[in-house]
Amino acid sequence: MKRRPRDERPVVFRGTVVGPSELRQIRRVIASRPRQTRQDIARATCRLFGWRCDSGAWAVRASRELLVRLEQEGRIRLPAARRPQGRPRREALQLATRLLEPLRDGPWESRPGAALLVRPIGADELLGWRAYMERYHYLGDAAVVGETLRYAAFLDGELVALLGWGSASLHNGPRDRYLGWDTAAQRAHRHLVVNNVRFLMLVRQPHLASRVLAANLRRLSRDWQTTYGHPVVLAESFVDSSRFRGTCYRASNWRCVGETQGWAKHGHAYRFHGQPKSVWLYPLSRDFCQRLCALPALTTQETRMALDVERLPLAGAGGLFSVLGTVTDPRKRRGIRHQVRSVLAIAVCATLAGARSFIAIAEWAAEQSREVLLKLGSQRGQPPSERTVRRVLHAIDAEEVDRRTGAWVAQQVHLQGRALSIDGKTLRGSRDGAKPAVHLLSAIVHGSGTVVAQVAVGEKTNEIPRLQPLLAELDIKGGVVTADALHTQRETARYLVEDKDAHYVFTVKDNQPTLLDDIETLHLDAFPPSAHDER
């Protein structure tokens, strides 16, 4: 059988087979936009085929890489790039490298109990991060593929390590054999795997590398969720066995699952370099194997991003605008183009439509008609930019917004006579250095799972005194409140029955033996829990 030339073979991208018919559509998109940039053409191609990231945003970066690949193969012709892509200018990188402080020779000592902080770097720190990698890492600096996060580690405020994470490798034999997932599962869930592409220790101290790595792993999935709208459940890393033994990975409970065959990807091809690397894996979730090997969902991002704004109760008495309009605007009045209630309403609607990142929210707003934007409170019918959405959502008081929107949701579901569950959860991965993990106490409607209120539990208290502030603004008259044994308290029961005119169902355990004995000898048909006892 005669083999087709390479430039005629179809390419599978995000579930779409890019064949001759799809190439003709892409060529028409390019021809209809002769003056637009490659970024604009990539976004138009995403809209043509419905290519979205898991955050709900258009997969513009991946689409642009596909278009460049098709151009290199001679299938399409793109407009010239307006600026160089990838690494920064060599002169800028060399200047940043010369400004670096010389590193210490020999061991570095710190005081006992020194505080370790691992955090993502800021935009103004990117050039310095890359300069450190170019100067001190044996692989140098390189463009990280796909979704990326870069971190810096500080011990008592002094920089001690740098880490970089990127998208998982496309082909990893030891990892794939360990997971046992098929091609469909790989294509659907590979974004849940993250690759430790760089790890640079700037000082020498016993056990410091494993401490830095462990602190980074505790917050990695949460940061990925915040940045890209989805968590990660498995971390992978490649260790050159001829240089390193992977001691810090072993000390952090990583598992070595085998070695590669000595091939590396160069552009769109693979070359044999003859230097196998050991593959290390670390699960970030207990059910990582089930989540990665699960069958792909049949729903598409295009379906999830659909939302009928006309059906939402926005304007009028009791509408969402009346609630968001009471939120304090932290910005200065001068130069404001988008009211805070409009930005919040757009963010709420975009989130309901499936957007899970600031970019996805801004793209959802840009795709709406002028009439829809006017209905959402935009004075000029113009969508806010991604920077505006990010700046407003970072500046507002999150607790105030959560309290007001929770009360509004409670009005929509009519809590009178309904059953509520009180549950407290610690957010996994929310611990940040010396700052403890965030613990929330939530009120959840039985059956629907709707969260109508939640409050933070401080590190110097517990859930018991936070229950009354949680239910203070909720009308639960005639309803039933369920909670675990921690809330089986006399004052809590009195508050629910007398102040809120509600009922309760609490759990009693052996740590309250007197109450447990009374209940075992009590005729509940003669003395219901919410009634008053004459004794």
Image (cartoon, grey):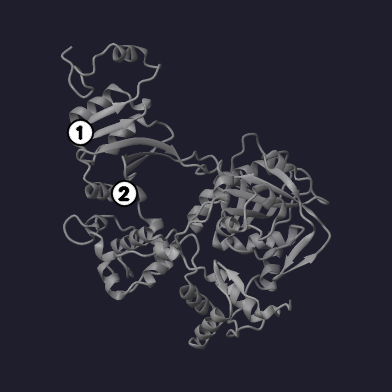
Q: Which residue is mark 1?
A: 500
Real-space CA distance between mark 1 and mark 2, rounded to the nearest whole angstrom? 22 Å
The answer to whether residue 287 is left or right of residue 413 is right
**Relative to 467, is 126 on the left or the right?**
right
Q: Is residue 165 above or below residue 435?
A: below
- Report the amino acid beneath label 1: Lys
Evaluate whether residue 201 shows in this view: no
Quadrant in which the N terminus is drawn: bottom right
Q: Residue at x 32, y 36 (%)?
A: 421
* Classed neighbour count for the residue bearing mark 1: other residues with Cα under 10 Å, few (<14), some (14–19), many (≥20): some
Provide the secondary structure element on which disc 1 rests.
loop
Residue sticking out furthest to the front? 1
Tell me residue 190's x, y (percent). 59, 57
Q: Quadrant of residue 137?
A: bottom right
Q: At 75% across and 48% down in the image, what residue appears?
A: 258
Identify whether 169 is placed above or below 367: above
Residue under numbered circle 2: 400
* Labels 1, 2: front one: 1
Q: Which amino acid type is marked by label 2? A: Glu
- Residue 10 locus on image (x, y percent): 62, 75
Relative depth, front residue between 181 and 29: 181
Left or right, residue 495 beside residue 273 = left
Position of residue 375 in the picture relative to residue 22 (left or right):
left
The percent position of residue 487, horizontal first and vertical second, equals 34, 27
**Mark drawn on residue 333:** none
